Image: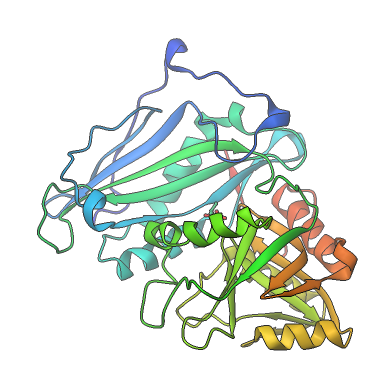
Amino acid sequence: MLGTDLEIVLHKATGEQRREKPDQDNLGFGQFFSDHMFVMHWNREKGWHDARLQPYQDFSVDPAAMVFHYGQAIFEGLKAYRGKDDQIYLFRPRENLERLNQSALRMCMPRVPVDRTLQALKALVYLDRDWVPDNEGATLYLRPTMIATEPALGLRPSEEYLFFVINSPVGAYYSEGFNPVKIYVEDTYVRAVPGGVGEAKTAGNYAASVKALTEAQRKGYSQVLWLDAVERKYIEEVGTSNIFFVINGELITPPLGGTILPGITRDSVLQLGRDWGMQVSERPITIDEVVAASEDGTLQEVFGSGTAAVISPIGELRYRDRSIVINNGETGELSRRFFEELQAIQYGHREDPHGWRVRVG
Ligand code: COI
């Protein structure tokens, strides 16, 4: 694998290759893309090579490329924040690249050189710095992605890959913004099985989830909450984020057991909870425990955590014929505190005791 010696060539977008900037107040999520992208290629002989920062453009990929047939595709999501004095920051980007490499191992794909790829991410954001929004809560979302490109139909790991990073200026992931969302507890479909690929950030996990999502949305819910595939009783994660419960003062999130995504926001929430002296537990939690806590009045708050979702308060969980209303459907105090603290660190408005922020430029 090529590492620090990987040469990165820069092709800046010309005036006419530059793209029209969207209205910053109506960004939505992932609908607009910036002027530049990063690409690099891998094959067995050369390792990573032909690395370029270039204008955003289409790819030419062979119809037999293995990604189209057998789904070797992994990705990441991280954000660039415009903070005080127009300084731009990334949040824990190294962890994203390390998680990408874990996904790569699981999917028999090549790992990226973390230091050099991080340099490329920073250079890309710097090139597209005008695309980092300056309004409250908006960010530039980076989507590093790797796909199998060898044209071949025999089932085996591809021997050629393309890695690319595109940028999208985004607002809140949910149309509710920071207001509580309603979530459907899914007990028919499952997301991941023990021994499967649940902890890898691979495209197939998301493809497999959209049927449950559309059915939940048809019933009026924003997302699904997945239960474990074996007993349909242990809580796993929400479609786009990890999940936290506050029960009787204890901050609880399901443990990383191979079937859920090791979220970087999840890890940051756990750390902040510990910093604040809370009782923090990564432990199995069943949907029945949540129902019981709701009934005896000890269920205080529920929220999702993720890069796209940030901290998303949950106001209602629908489980079979039961509606579990949390904190009267309002944003809880702790959800707000985690949201504000994380954002303040990400935008550079507050101390960064754990060294999570990385300056760009
Ligand atoms: C993220 O939070 O970055 C994700 O990748 C989730 C995706 C469904 C938007």
Name the foreground residue: 115 vs 141: 141
Task: Answer with left or right where residue 143 lies relative to residue 64.
Answer: right
Measuring from the top left, give residue 286's x and y in whole percent. 65, 86
Is 180 placed above or below 361 here?
Answer: below
Measuring from the top left, give residue 48's x and y in whole percent. 24, 49
> Toward which corner of the image does residue 340 lie, by quadrant?
bottom right
Measuring from the top left, give residue 305's x and y in whole percent. 66, 63
* Residue 171 seen in render: yes
- Rendered-image quadrant of the C terminus: top right
- Rendered-image quadrant of the N terminus: bottom left
Furthest-top residue in this view: 16
Measuring from the top left, give residue 231's x and y in whole percent. 51, 88
Name the foreground residue: 183 vs 68: 183
Residue drawn at x 41%, y 60% as measured from the top left = 100
Task: Answer with left or right where residue 358 lies relative to residue 48.
Answer: right
Residue drawn at x 61%, y 52% as measured from the top left = 308
> Toward which corner of the image does residue 60 lie, by quadrant?
top left
Name the foreground residue: 261 vs 323: 323
Task: Answer with left or right where residue 146 lies relative to residue 216.
Answer: left
Is 121 placed above or below 197 here?
Answer: above
Residue drawn at x 9%, y 59% as measured from the top left = 154
Is 144 placed above or below 243 here?
Answer: above
State which image quarter holds ligand 1: bottom right
